[in-house]
Image (spheres, rainbow, N blue to C red):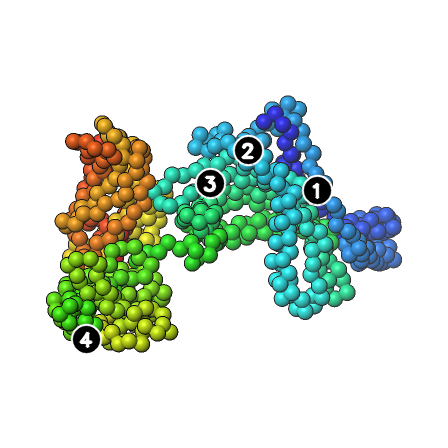
Amino acid sequence: MSAGIPNLGENSSQLFLSCSENVYFLAVLLGFYLFFYLHPISLRSSLDFREMGFLSTFLGIIGFGLGIPIGLLVGFFLFIYSEAKDVEDPVTRPLYELDSSALEDILPEIPFWVKNPDYDRVDWLNKFISDMWPYLDKAICSTIRTTAQPIFAEYIGKYHIKAIEFKNLSLGTLPPAIYGLKVYETNEKELVMEPAVRWAGNPNIVLGLKVLSLEITVQLVDLQIFTLPRIALKPLVPTFPCFSSIVLSLMEKPHLDFGINVLGGDVMSIPGLYRYVQETIKKQIARLYLWPQTLEIPVLDASTAAIKKPVGILHVNVVRALKLLKKDILGTSDPYVKLSLSGERLPAKKTTVKKNNLNPEWNEKFKLIVKEPDTQVLQLEVYDWDKVGGHDRLGMQLVPLKLLTPYEAKEFKLDLLKHTNISNPQNQKKRGQIQVEMNFVPFREDSAKFSGPLNGYGRKESRFSRAPDDEVEAGAGLLSVTVQGAEDVEGERHNNPYALVLFRGEQKKTKMIKRTRDPIWDEEFQFMLEEPPLHQKIHIEVKSKRTGISFRSKESLGHVEINLTDVVHNGRINEKYHLINSKNGVIHVEIRWKTV
């Protein structure tokens, strides 16, 4: 703080000192000049009505009456032909030259990292901005010109406006300064920070308007902006720059101060106008961007950065197959069907094997999770089961999901092909047919559950009261369990952690991370249920496995049981849980419930 600082306190006083440039003040002053100095006899005689003659009174009225229009004319002439002044750099003074009263005035200017321990000092970032400012200035001004050009074009021809253009456009030599930076830790896949930004700039922005035959200049001067924004980079994705959008919001109303020179005169000096303009701008900015209102700036293309989430369930009924190929020695086949959706890494679902049957009937139903109904296809493959060796493929067929209408069952009777390439000559051979019934059922959308305010940060609470259990939406649904990672899990003999998810007798397992106490798995497991899992618990256990041969190769690092009632009511939870039978272990789990 020993460095020089700009004298910011003179801005408000300059607004009132510039009143001498006001045309009305100049006109009245000139009128009194003509009245008092050109007609002194008339003024003195008018002080005594009893001694005032008709001639002196008449001359006094004429003098005052001529002074006002002449003053207005001269003032208007000076306004029209005055030029905008170049903006000069502010005078800076070191702190040791200031007296006690001046030091008290600058106490509010002390950086946040001095007054608040939650804010970090970021001199390195201010140095970076300072060095980059000449280039940022040109880049930002170029963007402003490009953006403003079509807006200006809309007004040309209206209100007798012939032309609008920037005569000068520069953000000045003084860059914004960050007086402190606060970073939040959340359970979501995002990076949240709050910088305290202050900018006492010296921009040189002059806008020229040509109205009829008059050219009017409007200049922005003495700009000061103090604001506390919240910047969220989310969601974090494995594609450079590793976040898909920037979400901005203001945590408090910004402080905004500036002057506007019109034809050389500061119009903000007009009594009442300054406060009205400042308050109006603050209200408009607060209405648009004050938290919880946000401004989202996309960075990555939606198709590239989008995280694919389940949107519905595909119900498939494999009815039968007809006239299949003979693959066995006895002139028959042992067929079964494999079903899978494109873009999924899950194991394919299988029907039962029908022994010695070229026209098998299954009538077996399956459920598959759909993430992109517009692009995904259902792949059907018919195989001949063999006890020894590989299974021979009898034929295959693809069904695009975009052919389906939600909630409407549709039957398909398809000719089996050798390859997906229709032009392949091998597809001319008849391989039989397969008959299936398909129905796509999307999940119910209930955005009201996530429209409430944040509890702390990173967690949304419903604005509605919790519904009783008997009012919960019944029906089938999808339970998605994402094991994000764990912290401070430590084994007695080895640290190669992996997680086990157990629910309703079904067990799923994450990959093993070798030699770490803070594993990150980020693996999702899905359970399709026929009813909401009210009053049920899911068991998650962290274990460690020795990579070599040992009698005690596995070791438990802790476990947790999560009640799913809150998940059913809220639709989603995203929490960190302390592991039972672990000293400091914590596991991060996200669970979602969607009904169809």
Amino acid marked by disc 3: Glu
Query: Which badge, 1 or 3, is on the more N-terminal residue?
Result: 1
Nearer the camera: disc 2 or disc 1: 2
Q: How many numbered discs sit on the rendered protein?
A: 4
The residue that label 3 is drawn on is 194
Res. 147 in view: yes
Query: Which badge, 1 or 4, is on the more N-terminal residue?
Result: 1
The residue that label 1 is drawn on is 17
Residue most extreme to the top: 96
Mark 1 vs 3: CB contact within 8 A: no
Residue 301: x %, y % from top left: 46, 56
Amino acid marked by disc 1: Leu
Query: Which badge, 4 or 3, is on the more N-terminal residue?
Result: 3
The residue located at (51%, 38%) in the rendering is 196
Q: Name the quadrant containing residue 183.
A: top left
Residue 73: x %, y % from top left: 80, 58
The residue located at (87%, 50%) in the rendering is 38
Mark 1 vs 4: CB contact within 8 A: no
Residue 90 versus residue 346 in the image, above or below = above
Q: Nearer the viewer, residue 326 or 201?
A: 326
How far apart are the two marked residues, 2 and 1, measured between alpha carbons?
A: 39 Å
The residue that label 4 is drawn on is 322
Res. 290 in view: no
- The numbered dot on residue 124 is 2
Q: Name the quadrant containing residue 441.
A: bottom left
The residue located at (67%, 32%) in the rendering is 92
- Image quarter where the C terminus lies is bottom left
